Amino acid sequence: MDLSEITKRLKLEVKAGNGSLSNEVQGGYASDLISDVIANAEEGDLWVTLQTHQNTVAVASMKGLAGIVLVNGREPEADTLQKAREENIPLLVSALPAFELIGRLYNLGLSGIRK
C-alpha cells in the first residue's frame, strides 16, 4: 500500500514530503529511540514516533524509510520540518496516540514482521 492511501484512510496531516507520498510502505516500526530505529527498522518501513527533532529525518533518509508519523498531535520542530522538506521525507502527524495508530495500521495490513 502506498503512503498516500494510508494518509487518506487514517486522516494523517502531511507536513512535508508531498512528493514522496507514492512511497510503497512495506511494514511498520514504532520506537522513540534513534539507536533502536537505526539498528532494527527496515527500508520501506513507516516509522511511528513521538520524537520531533531533526535527527528523525536523518535516520529516515539513511534507512530508506517510507515516512515518519508523529503521534499525539505532536508538531515537528521548525528545523525538522525544513530538513524533511529539503530531503523530501514524508513527515505526517496523527492526533491519535501511538497504540491506537499502530492498531489501525495493522488493520490496514501493515506488520512489523517481514514475510
Image (cartoon, grey):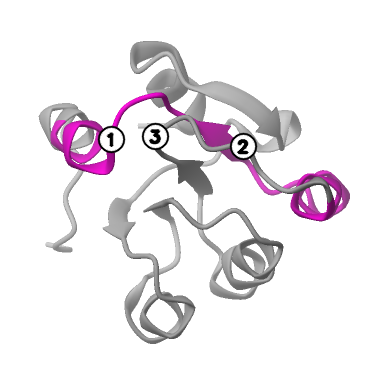
Residue 113 % position (x, y): 14, 62
Left or right: 68, with 104 as reference point: right
Left or right: 41, with 19 as reference point: left
Residue 6 % position (x, y): 39, 25
Quarter that holds the C terminus: bottom left
Q: On residue 27, which mark appears?
A: none
Q: Callout 2: few (<14), some (14-19), or many (20+) C-alpha neighbours within 10 Å?
A: some
Left or right: 104, with 36 as reference point: left
Sequence-wise first label, 3 or 1: 3
Sequence-wise first label, 2 or 1: 2
Which amino acid, by three-letter code, is at mark 3? Asn
Comparing 36 with 19, the one in front is 36
Residue for badge 1 = 97
Magenta span includes 89: yes
Q: Quadrant of residue 31?
A: bottom left
Left or right: 70, with 102 as reference point: right
Residue for badge 2 = 75
Residue 19 vertical placement versus 69 (above, below): above
Which amino acid, by three-letter code, is at mark 2? Glu
* Secondary structure of the residue carrying numbered label 2: loop
> What's the magenta region?
79-103
Residue 60 % position (x, y): 58, 64
* Secondary structure of the residue carrying numbered label 3: loop
In space, the residues marked 2 and 3 are separated at their CA atoms by: 9 Å
Q: Residue at x 42, y 13 (%)?
A: 11
Residue 97 % position (x, y): 28, 35
Q: Are marks 2 and 3 in contact (CB under 8 Å)?
A: no
Comparing 69 with 90, the one in front is 69
Residue for badge 3 = 72
In space, the residues marked 2 and 1 are separated at their CA atoms by: 14 Å
Q: Are marks 3 and 1 in contact (CB under 8 Å)?
A: yes
